[in-house]
């Protein structure tokens, strides 16, 4: 069922961290595109502008009288500029330059201008040859005294900056300038484009998004926490085990999962549920770490809890509990054939948690989880434990999660911050609701915020804590595509259960929230 859109203020829809993260992730694309635009502009300017060279010289205009008035000198500079420009364009001036240089024609353009509000006069000469532009400028300077007398006998023009032979063509300088400006403009345009695309990306970027976009009750939310304890660990890529039983776990981080465990227990007790399945839409949403910490939080309530790794294609639970000696030689096939000589379940006495870990990858995982042996296994486990927490593969990659949801009592969707599209999350929730397990709600995981924008959240105790991506999925190259979100047509015999669950869902969600508040 698609979540109905709500009228949300624009500022509430903006998530600064996701915008900056997406911009930074695509920065190399922006830089390459901006550089390409600048180079194309450079080529365009160089190919369309004629090659010319410009040299310049600057004069100081003053009077031969004793007057030191700056106003007088400025006025004289203005008069000299207008008159001097007329003289330069005269046929007399052109003939003198051609005579001095032995030219048949005056192949250059000249201009005169005042430098700001000063008595400085600048002469610019442009020609197709750098040496010709310089020679014409020197010829004009040689005739400057005689030319100045035509304007005023009192005017004195002293050279302040000598001309030199231009080294670069005007087109090159213009092309470089336009290249830089074009690259900067393209950088701003492409940056704005990626920011808009990031804003329009319909992912879940916070607790408000979870409430407004996802068609499921919020069980809890966990904020990101740096998994590295020191700079040495960061550069050595040594991530800490982010479990609530570790000494490095913060108080807020632990309290988050205790609150989640209380909400889960409230929902489980009202339904007599024991097996709790956790899944997600895609990889990299932190589902395995959430499963482990939920199991530890339940075990802390003096419950007999088993945590089982049913991600048979990509097992990763053993990485979180690497300090526990597991029966790695025992696998599911041996267990089902009855050839296993010892139990695959081990007890972690330090954490008071039972573990059913797996290291082997199974290409026929769908056949295993849908077999009668797995049904029998779940029935036996339900009879021996207070709670069984089941870690499963992502629903967007495998059908295993839905098969296991038909063997479980409760199902929970782990939604990663800014990872899966909201419509995909809602499709996955719809698929879970067709299964035997009652869909309890969602846990929003790994929420990021900019440090200077952090504040008190709405609900869940107002904590700011979380964890990184320890134990996240790698490349699921072995999964392949089995279809999406339960469109297999194989669950029609659960229609009655799904209909009854839908009728009581609203009441159960209210009770879940009330129970969580009382126990919290």
Image (cartoon, helix red, strand yellow):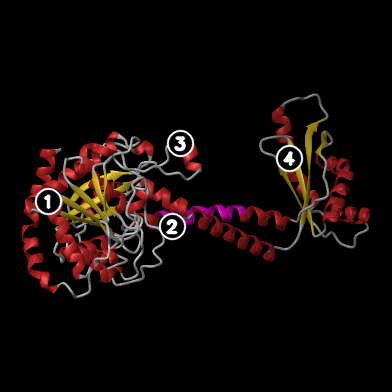
Give the CA distance from mark 1 to mark 3.
Answer: 39 Å
Residue extent of the magenta highlight: 180-195
Q: Is residue 189 visible?
A: yes
| Residue 55 x %, y % | 79, 49
Q: Is residue 1 visible?
A: no
Determine contact: label 1, label 3, CB under 8 Å: no
**Circle nearer the N terminus (4, 3):** 4
Q: Which residue is mark 2?
A: 193
Give the CA distance from mark 2 to mark 4.
Answer: 52 Å
Q: Which residue is mark 3?
A: 230
Q: Which residue is mark 1?
A: 268
Closer-to-camera residue (53/497): 497
Label the magenta part by its dominant secondary structure. helix
* Residue depicted at x 93% and y 58%: 102
Q: Which residue is mark 4?
A: 79
State the residue lying farthest toward the bottom: 489
Residue 175 in which image quadrant: bottom right
Horizontally, residue 35 falls left or right of residue 190, namely right
Alpha-carbon neighbours of circle 4 within 10 Å: few (<14), some, or many (≥20)? few
* Residue depicted at x 19% and y 48%: 305
């Amino acid at each position: 069922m698609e979540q109905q859109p709500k009228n949300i203020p624009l500022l509430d829809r903006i998530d600064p961290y996701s915008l900056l993260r997406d911009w930074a992730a695509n920065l190399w694309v922006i830089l390459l595109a901006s550089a390409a635009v600048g180079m194309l502009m450079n080529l365009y300017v160089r190919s369309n502008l004629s090659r010319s060279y410009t040299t310049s010289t600057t004069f100081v205009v003053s009077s031969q009288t004793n007057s030191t008035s700056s106003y007088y000198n400025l006025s004289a500079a203005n008069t000299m500029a207008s008159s001097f420009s007329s003289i330069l364009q005269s046929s007399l001036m052109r003939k003198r330059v051609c005579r001095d240089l032995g030219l048949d024609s005056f192949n250059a353009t000249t201009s005169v201008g005042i430098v700001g509000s000063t008595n400085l006069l600048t002469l610019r000469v442009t020609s197709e040859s750098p040496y010709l532009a310089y020679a014409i400028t020197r010829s004009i300077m040689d005739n400057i005294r005689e030319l100045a007398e035509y304007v005023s006998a009192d005017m004195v023009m002293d050279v302040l900056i000598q001309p030199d032979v231009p080294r670069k063509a005007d087109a090159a300088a213009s092309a470089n300038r336009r290249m830089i400006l074009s690259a900067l403009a393209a950088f701003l345009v492409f940056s704005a484009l990626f920011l808009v695309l990031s804003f329009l990306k319909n992912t879940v970027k916070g607790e408000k998004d979870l409430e407004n976009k996802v068609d499921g009750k919020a069980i809890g939310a966990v904020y990101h926490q740096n998994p590295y304890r020191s700079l040495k660990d960061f550069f050595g890529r040594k991530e800490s085990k982010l479990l609530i039983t570790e000494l490095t776990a913060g108080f807020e981080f632990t309290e988050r999962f205790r609150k989640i465990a209380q909400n889960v227990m409230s929902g489980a007790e009202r339904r007599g549920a024991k097996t709790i399945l956790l899944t997600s839409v895609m990889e990299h949403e932190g589902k395995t770490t959430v499963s482990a910490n939920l199991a530890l939080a339940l075990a802390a309530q003096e419950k007999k809890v088993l945590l089982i790794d049913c991600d048979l294609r990509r097992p990763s639970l053993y990485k979180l509990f690497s300090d526990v000696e597991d029966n790695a030689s025992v696998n599911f096939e041996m267990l089902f054939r009855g050839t296993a000589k010892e139990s695959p379940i081990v007890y972690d006495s330090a954490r008071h948690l039972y573990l059913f870990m797996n290291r082997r990858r199974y290409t026929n995982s769908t056949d295993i989880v849908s077999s009668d042996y797995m049904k029998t296994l779940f029935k036996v486990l339900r009879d021996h434990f207070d709670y069984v927490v089941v870690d499963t593969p992502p629903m967007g990659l495998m059908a295993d999660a839905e098969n296991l949801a038909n063997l479980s009592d409760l199902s929970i969707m782990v939604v990663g911050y800014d990872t899966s599209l909201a419509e995909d999350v809602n499709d996955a929730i719809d698929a879970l609701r067709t299964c035997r397990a009652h869909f309890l709600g969602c846990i929003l995981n790994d929420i990021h915020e900019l440090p200077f924008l952090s504040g008190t959240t709405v609900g869940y105790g107002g904590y700011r804590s979380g964890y990184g991506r320890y134990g996240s999925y790698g490349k699921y190259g072995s999964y392949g595509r089995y279809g999406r979100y339960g469109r297999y047509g194989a669950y029609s015999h659960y229609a009655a259960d799904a209909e009854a669950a839908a009728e009581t869902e609203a009441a159960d969600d209210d009770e879940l929230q009330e129970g969580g508040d009382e126990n919290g």
